[in-house]
Image (tube, helix red, strand yellow):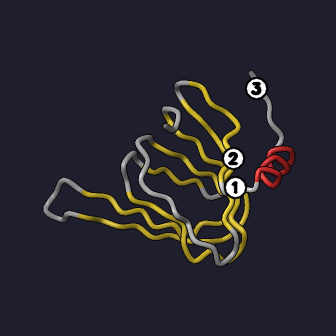
């Protein structure tokens, strides 16, 4: 099992794979990958069964998180600008997506437990 990673090498692997998401680590308790969306692109994500943490490595976009509250308020949404250094937590089964992507968005994603 690999324990150390270099972002530059992960970016090269990601580019060679030709996919939006490149998983580089998987153990039962978590998985992690690099997610890249082009400027002007769309984020096709649907809710996941795991909690997630996103760390924005580079780029500029907005993220909307909509959750079903167990209160009279019903649905609540947050929509925020995310840029290099932003850290975002999304609870399992919560609607979320990046949008209004102004600069290529490069994100480190951590799922707990591992994404299914």
Query: Closest to the observer: 76 or 24?
Result: 24
Disc number at residue 22?
Answer: 2
Disc number at residue 3?
Answer: 3
Q: Position of residue 75 (x, y in %)?
A: 25, 64
Q: Is residue 31 left or right of residue 57?
A: left
Q: Residues within 10 Å of mark 3 (few under 14, many from 20)?
A: few
**Secondary element type, mark 1:** loop
Q: Position of residue 96 (x, y in %)?
A: 44, 61
**Secondary element type, mark 3:** loop
Q: Is residue 73 above or below residue 40?
A: above
Label 1: which residue?
Answer: 19
Q: Is residue 35 left or right of residue 95?
A: right
Answer whether labels 1 and 2 touch (C-beta < 8 Å).
yes
Question: In the image, what residue occupies the spot 66% across and 49% down?
Answer: 108
Q: Is residue 114 left or right of residue 66?
A: right
**Separation of marks 1 and 3 at Cα, in angstroms:** 23 Å
**Separation of marks 1 and 2 at Cα, in angstroms:** 7 Å
**Secondary element type, mark 2:** strand
Query: Closest to the observer: 115 or 6?
Result: 115
Question: In the image, what residue occupies the spot 69% across and 49% down?
Answer: 34
Q: Position of residue 50 (x, y in %)?
A: 44, 40
Q: Residues within 10 Å of mark 1 (few under 14, many from 20)?
A: few
For the residues carrying marks 1 and 2, which lies nearer the camera in this image?
Answer: 1
Dividing the image into 4 quarters, which one contains the N terminus? top right
């Amino acid at each position: 099992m690999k324990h150390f990673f270099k972002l530059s090498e992960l970016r090269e692997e990601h580019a060679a794979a030709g996919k939006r998401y490149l998983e580089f680590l998987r153990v039962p308790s978590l998985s992690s990958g690099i997610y890249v969306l082009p400027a002007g692109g769309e984020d096709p994500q649907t809710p996941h069964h795991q909690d997630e943490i996103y760390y924005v490595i580079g780029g500029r976009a907005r993220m909307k998180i909509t959750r079903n509250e167990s209160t009279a308020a019903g649905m609540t949404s947050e929509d925020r600008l995310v840029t290099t250094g932003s850290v975002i937590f999304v609870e399992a089964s919560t609607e979320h997506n990046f949008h209004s992507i102004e600069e290529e968005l490069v994100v480190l994603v951590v799922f707990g437990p591992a994404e299914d």
